[in-house]
């Protein structure tokens, strides 16, 4: 019986060694390189920006299908472009020789749309370009998170002063 027990013991030891080797190899194959967490965040941020750019492209396609479109008397949406960053650029034509536009409502509207504001957290910005009927740029305005924060501070200051209105000063370009 000793030889039989020794043989069984040897087989068990061999099986254990094989199992350990197999487990070790499986562990080595699954090992993840020690990449700093920051690099992983940067990759996730890049992926997020790619996803935002895709959504912006879809939105631009929808808006451009209806363009040119009169949004209000004297203001026509000509086209929408998706840019780096990602960003959205809205091109408008001011009809009837309109030489200027109050930027306050544009900033207010952009900053008050939750989806637009959410995207701004990731560096997204919105540019509004206004042209005359001949295609000459009259003005442009860029609204980003900093512009919204400045707008909110200005609005709060006006409210504290009792005017109840925000001024027509916009931050942006």
Image (spheres, helix red, strand yellow):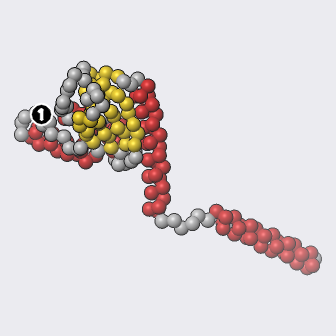
Measured from the top left, where is residue 62 in percent x and y? 44, 28
Q: Which residue is pictured at 6% across the width and 40% down the height?
A: 161
* Residue under the image location 39 percent in, 37 percent down: 81
Pick the residue in front: 131 or 102. Answer: 131
Report the side of 108 relative to 32 (left or right).
Answer: left
| Rendering quarter of residue 127 | top left
Rendering coords of residue 35 (x, y %):
51, 65
Secondary structure beneath disc 1? loop
Q: Nearer the viewer, residue 7 or 167?
A: 167
Count of numbered tags? 1
Vertical comparison of 129 with 19: above or below? above
Relative side of 91 to 27, left or right: left
One can see residue 112 in this view: no
Q: Can you give x and y, in whole percent of width and height, for residue 172 in the image?
A: 23, 44
Q: Position of residue 116 (x, y in %)?
A: 34, 38
Q: In this figure, which residue is indicated by the disc labeled 1?
A: 165
Front-lying residue, 163 or 65:
65
Above or below residue 106? Residue 29 is: below
Asked if residue 93 is positioned above or below residue 45 in the image, the reply reads above
């Amino acid at each position: 019986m000793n030889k039989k027990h020794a043989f069984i013991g040897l087989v068990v030891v061999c099986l254990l060694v094989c199992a350990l080797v197999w487990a070790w190899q499986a562990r080595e194959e699954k090992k993840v390189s020690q990449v700093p967490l920051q690099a992983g965040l940067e990759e996730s941020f890049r992926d997020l920006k790619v996803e935002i750019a895709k959504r912006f492209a879809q939105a631009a396609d929808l808006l451009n299908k209806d363009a040119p479109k009169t949004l209000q008397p004297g203001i026509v949406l000509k086209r929408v472009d998706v840019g780096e960053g990602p960003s959205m650029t809205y091109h408008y034509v001011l009809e009837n020789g309109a030489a200027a536009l109050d930027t306050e409502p544009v900033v207010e509207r952009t900053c008050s749309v939750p989806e637009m504001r959410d995207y701004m957290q990731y560096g997204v910005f919105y540019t509004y370009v206004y042209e005359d009927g001949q295609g000459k740029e009259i003005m442009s305005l860029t609204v980003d998170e900093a512009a919204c924060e400045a707008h909110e501070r200005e609005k709060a200051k006006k409210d504290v002063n009792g005017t109840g209105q925000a001024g027509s000063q916009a931050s942006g370009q």
